[in-house]
Image (cartoon, rainbow, N blue to C red):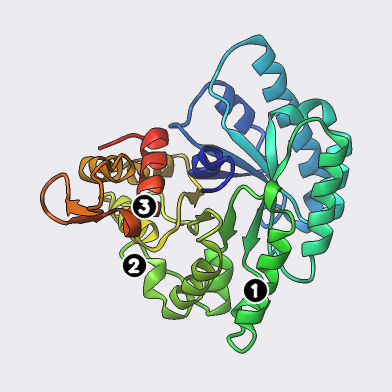
């Protein structure tokens, strides 16, 4: 299995907040959000080009506020990540916020591609060489060069080679559902899932095929957080079920109300938990197959072992239904 496997699975529901948000520090300190969750402070798409300096200043205030508060009292501290615009910005933020970066787990790289991978990788290695603390990276696969079907295979294999080169620093690989949807002029409603958009579903299949055997790949953002009769919640649950079936773990969320729904979906059913436990503790000599805990299906050690490891890790982090 992967190194730091529990931490990688623990990213879970990643709540995005614009770095300009002046209230997010108080929300973290006062524990206003369901937990567990992770937090992404975004300097990219949620910030206009003429507000970057202001956003970086507010980011520094947010980090210092949370960091100082943590020294004074105990509260749930999520894994915090900063979504940057460029490798140059990453290095600048590191130099300008050294005293507060102890609460930061790593950095998110949008539109990670063959064109910028080397610069991002070099920047991550540079700050880790300077720091006694380990900083992780989470590249987002959402660039246009992945979409072109004629070159997609070579591009994905090339990007994986770039990510493999800094594997020790990679916590998750993420996908950009909205960026892909924009390329196809598509947008799902709360009674539809990203998998209903065939070009994107096929694209996700290619990404998962290349990456999910070696990396945790996180599911795309769900835009809805309100509706008259909680249809948004039903739709999110449906998409999360398909995420889980296809190999995505965790999800980008854009509203605190979504966190609880994601965490519920990450829980493990009692039947799956018992089957996984049985497979991992198999003690029958010779015979490597048997009836499941509920007597409904087959448990075969050799073909279900990876599923069992994954199931037990999820159960430990998110619980059993």
Answer whether residue 72 is visible to the viewer in this image. Answer: yes
Q: Are marks 3 and 1 in contact (CB under 8 Å)?
A: no
The numbered disc on residue 17 is: none
The numbered disc on residue 192 is: 2
Residue that numbered label 3 is attached to: 305
The answer to whether residue 252 is above or below residue 163 is above
Residue plotted at (58% across, 26% down): 77
Q: Do the residues labelled 3 and 2 touch (CB within 8 Å)?
A: no
Answer whether residue 86 is visible to the viewer in this image. Answer: no
The answer to whether residue 159 is above or below residue 276 is below
Identify the secondary structure beneath mark 1: helix
Identify the secondary structure beneath mark 2: loop
The numbered disc on residue 157 is: 1
Looking at the picture, tell me which residue is in the foreground, 18 or 13.
13
Residue plotted at (58% across, 22% down): 29
| Figure quadrant of the C terminus | top left
**How packed is label 2: few (under 14 Cα within 10 Å), some, or many (20 or more)?**
some
**How packed is label 1: few (under 14 Cα within 10 Å), some, or many (20 or more)?**
some
Count of numbered marks: 3
Please state the horizontal and vertical placement of residue 110, each as a whole percent of the image: 68, 59
Which one is closest to the eye, mark 3 or mark 2? 3
């Amino acid at each position: 299995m992967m190194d730091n496997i529990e931490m990688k699975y623990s990213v879970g529901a990643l709540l995005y907040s614009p770095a300009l948000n002046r209230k997010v520090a108080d929300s973290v300190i006062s524990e206003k959000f369901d937990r567990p969750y992770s937090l992404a402070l975004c300097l990219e798409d949620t910030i206009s080009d003429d507000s970057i300096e202001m956003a970086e200043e507010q980011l520094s205030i947010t980090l210092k506020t949370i960091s100082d508060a943590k020294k004074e009292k105990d509260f749930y501290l999520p894994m915090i990540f900063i979504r940057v615009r460029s490798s140059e910005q990453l290095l600048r933020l590191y130099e300008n916020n050294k005293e507060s970066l102890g609460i930061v787990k790593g950095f998110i790289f949008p539109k990670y591609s063959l064109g910028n991978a080397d610069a991002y990788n070099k920047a991550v290695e540079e700050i880790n060489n300077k720091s006694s603390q380990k900083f992780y990276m989470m590249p987002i696969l959402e660039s246009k060069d992945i979409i072109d079907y004629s070159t997609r295979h070579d591009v994905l294999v090339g990007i994986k080679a770039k990510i493999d080169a800094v594997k020790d620093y990679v916590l998750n690989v993420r996908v950009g559902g909205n960026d892909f949807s924009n390329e196809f002029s598509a947008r799902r409603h709360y009674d539809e899932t990203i998998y209903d958009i065939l070009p994107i579903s096929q694209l996700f299949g290619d990404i998962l095929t290349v990456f999910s055997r070696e990396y945790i790949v996180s599911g795309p953002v769900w835009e809805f957080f309100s509706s008259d009769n909680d249809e948004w919640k039903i739709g999110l649950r449906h998409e999360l079920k398909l995420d889980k079936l296809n190999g995505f773990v965790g999800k980008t969320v854009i509203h605190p109300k979504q966190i609880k729904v994601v965490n519920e979906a990450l829980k493990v059913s009692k039947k799956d938990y018992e089957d996984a436990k049985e497979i991992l503790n198999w003690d029958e000599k010779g015979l490597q197959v048997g009836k499941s805990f509920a007597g409904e299906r087959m448990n075969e050690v050799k073909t279900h072992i990876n599923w069992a490891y994954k199931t037990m890790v999820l159960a430990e982090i998110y619980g059993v239904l």
